[in-house]
Amino acid sequence: MSRRSHKRLKLVAVTLLCVVTLAGCTQEEQDRIKNVKPPTPGTPASGSDVTGIYRSFNLAVLQLRADGTYALIVKDSAATSGQFTLSSGQLEVQSDSCGSAVGRYTVVVTGEKKAGKAKLEITPTSDDCARRKADLTAAPWVYADS
């Protein structure tokens, strides 16, 4: 094999290796991105518009799941979970820790439609459960790159 052919073969092999490596990385990145669906700014029409993991500036985590359940973890407070519904920006929540009390809130998405930029602004309408009300409305909830 000539020196020139050897160089070409080596170049083809390196190029092929780079393409395969980048394709693998690209697929992994695409899979990660499929899981990240920041909410669109405005009034969310339904729960599916805001599903995901949110963090607040006071180190709390709120996960809104597609099945209508949620988990809320707040520093210096017991973790809670329950059910939620959302229709035309009107959020209703129930949790075991609050008994039969139903919390009602208004939800608006602000910021950019990007992880780390989209924010849930939750404003109480009525909730007899003081702890839940305080935890949900203490700070804006920022969509996390989950």
Image (cartoon, helix red, strand yellow):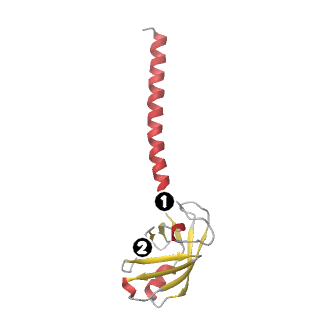
At which x and y percent is residue 124? Answer: 55, 84
Secondary structure under badge 2? strand
Secondary structure under badge 1? loop
| Amino acid bearing label 1 | Asp
The answer to which of marks 1 and 2 sits earlier in the sequence is 2
Q: Relative to 22, say whether 137 is above or below.
A: below
Q: Relative to 117, say whether 29 is above or below.
A: above
Examine the image and state in which quarter residue 118 appears.
Answer: bottom right
Q: Which of 138 and 9 is in front in this view?
A: 9
| Amino acid bearing label 2 | Thr
Please name the residue shown 49% across and 79% down the image.
136
Q: How far apart are marks 1 and 2 (CA)?
A: 20 Å
> Badge 2: few (under 14), some or many (20 or more) residues near its Cα, within 10 Å?
some
Examine the image and state in which quarter residue 44 appears.
Answer: bottom right
At which x and y percent is residue 29? Answer: 47, 48
Image quadrant in which the C terminus is located: bottom left
Please name the residue shown 60% across and 65% down the image.
40
Mark 1 or mark 2, which is nearer to you? 2
Label 1: which residue?
145
> Badge 1: few (under 14), some or many (20 or more) residues near its Cα, within 10 Å?
some
Label 2: which residue?
69
At which x and y percent is residue 22? Answer: 47, 38
Q: Residue furthest bottom?
A: 128
At which x and y percent is residue 25? Answer: 45, 42
